[in-house]
Amino acid sequence: MGARATRLSDLKIKAAKPKDKDYTLTDGDGLQLRVRTNGSRLWNFNYIHPVTKKRINMGLGTFPELSLAHARKRTVEARELVAQGLGPKEQRDADRPAKKAATEHTFQNLATD
């Protein structure tokens, strides 16, 4: 069994300062926090695509808008899709039009009801 990455904490994340180059902090199970040179912090899920066997980075969101606990939850959900043989990035991209259609013309829908 491989070595387990040291889990991140909110304190470690808040203490992560920008450097000359982008760098990555790992939490384990494919969850990574990329610290950019401009100071922004981006959550990524790194996984091997079940069909193509290529390594893929899927963006989950930005810190602090997406907390550590929520990023871990999204990683677990994405891992379940990989275990089912589905690509979580493709699944997310396929779901976007449906989510957009559900929220589109919300005011009009409320006004006509």
Image (tube, rainbow, N blue to C red):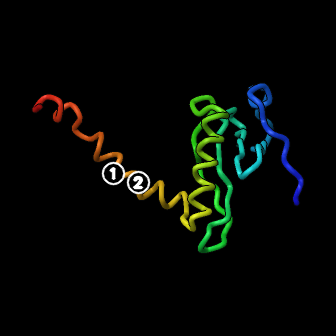
The quadrant in which the N terminus is found is bottom right
Figure quadrant of residue 39: top right
Figure label count: 2
Is residue 86 visible in the rendered image? The answer is yes
The Cα atoms of the two marked residues, 2 and 1, are separated by 6 Å
Q: Is residue 80 left or right of residue 104?
A: right
Q: Pointer 2 and pointer 1: residues touching (CB < 8 Å)?
A: yes
Looking at the image, residue 83 lies above or below residue 31: below
Which residue is at a point 76% across and 34% down the rendered structure image? 18
Looking at the image, residue 85 lies above or below residue 81: below
Q: Is residue 42 left or right of residue 21?
A: left
SS at circle 2: helix
Q: Tell which of 24 and 96 is nearer to you.
A: 96
The quadrant in which the C terminus is found is top left
Q: Tell which of 22 and 31 is nearer to you.
A: 31
Which residue is at a point 80% across and 36% down the rendered structure image? 19
Which residue is at a point 67% across and 36% down the rendered structure image? 41
Give the image location of residue 31, x and y in percent: 70, 47
Give the image location of residue 99, x and y in percent: 35, 46
| Residue 29, numbered label | none
| Residue 98, numbered label | 1
| Residue 95, numbered label | 2
Give the image location of residue 32, x and y in percent: 72, 46
What's the amino acid at mark 1?
Ala
Q: Residue furthest left?
A: 112
Label 2 CA crowd tier, 10 Å (few <14, some 14–19, many 20+): few
